[in-house]
Amino acid sequence: MELSITLSANAGVSVQIGDNTLWVDALHTDQQHGFSAVSPRLQGQMLTHPAFQNPKWICYTHCHGDHFSPELTRAAKKLWPQAELFLP
C-alpha cells in the first residue's frame, strides 16, 4: 500500500494511504509568529493539488487558530460533504 504525506502550512498535512486521504490540521488561517498559515493563494493551490482532493477524513488535533479554521472547514465540507470531520 502506498503512503504519501504532503504539507499544507505550519503542522498541517494531507496523508494519502492507498485510495484514502486524511487531512490533519490542514486548514487554518491564523498567522502566528514563526508559523505559516493557509493564505487565500495557498488555499487555491491546495484545491487543485492531487494530495488535497476528496478527503475521506478531516481531523484536527486541537482548535487553536494556527491549526483550525471554522471557515475553511465549512468550505471543505461543502466541497466534500462525505468527508468525516474529527474535532477534539
Image (cartoon, grey):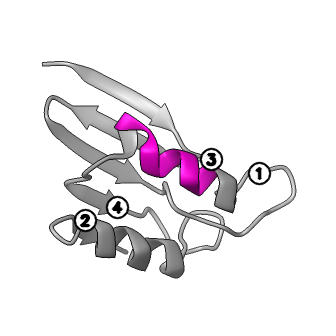
Does dot 2 land on a helix, a strand or a loop? loop
Residue that label 1 marks? 35
Does dot 4 land on a helix, a strand or a loop? strand
Query: Mark number for residue 9?
Result: 3
Residue 77 against residue 46 in the figure, above or below? below
Residue that label 4 marks? 59
Q: Residue at x 51, y 61 (%)?
A: 27
Quadrant holding the N terminus = top left
**Residue interval drawn in magenta:** 42-50
Residue that label 2 marks? 80
Image location of residue 42, percent across then percent down: 63, 50
Q: Amino acid at mark 4?
A: Cys
Q: CA distance from mark 2 to mark 3?
A: 20 Å
Image location of residue 58, percent across then percent down: 32, 61
Q: CA distance from mark 3 to mark 4?
A: 15 Å
Q: Badge 2, how many Cα within 10 Å: few under 14, some, many 20+?
A: some
